[in-house]
Amino acid sequence: MQYNGNANFTLDNSVWDAQTYSLNGQQVQKPATAASSASVMFGGPLKIPKLMQTSRGMFTINYQLRRSRSGTSQVGTMPTAAERAGDFSQAIITQGRSPSTIP
C-alpha cells in the first residue's frame, strides 16, 4: 500500500455564462459573479511505530474550500392596487397589446 493524494482548483466567472432570461420581456443585465473552489486530499496506510505495524488501518485527510462573489439585482413589476385587491380586468401582457386571461 502506498500513500496518495490529489489537489484540485477551479475558477468560474460570469463572463462564460449565458444571458439571463427575462420573465417579463424587460432587458435584464447579466449579474457579475466569480467563484473559486479548491480541494486537497491525502491518504494511505496508517503506521504508528511500536504500536501499529500492519497495514490494516487507513487514513484520509480531506480539505475543501469554496468562495463566491455575486452582485445580483432583481428586476420585476409590482402589482397595482386593483390587482392586489383581486381585480385583474385591467391587467395586460408584457408587450402591452391585449388583456390577459386568468383562468
Image: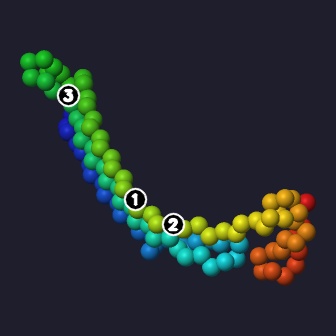
Image location of residue 22, percent across then percent down: 65, 72
The mark nearer the N terminus, 3 or 1, is 3
Image height check: is 89 above or below 98? above
| Name of the residue lying farthest toward the left | 50
Q: Identify the secondary structure beneath mark 1.
A: strand
- Type of amino acid at the residue the image marks with label 3: Leu
Which residue does the numbered mark 1 point to in the structure image? 68
| Secondary element at image label 3 | loop
Image quadrant in which the N terminus is located: top left
Q: What amino acid type is highlighted by mark number 1?
A: Ser
Disc ID at residue 46: 3
Contact between marks 3 and 2 (CB within 8 A): the answer is: no
The residue labelled by disc 2 is 72
Image location of residue 11, percent across then percent down: 36, 63
Task: From the top left corner, tell me how far across and down residue 21 is, in percent.
Answer: 63, 71
Q: Which mark is residue 81?
A: none
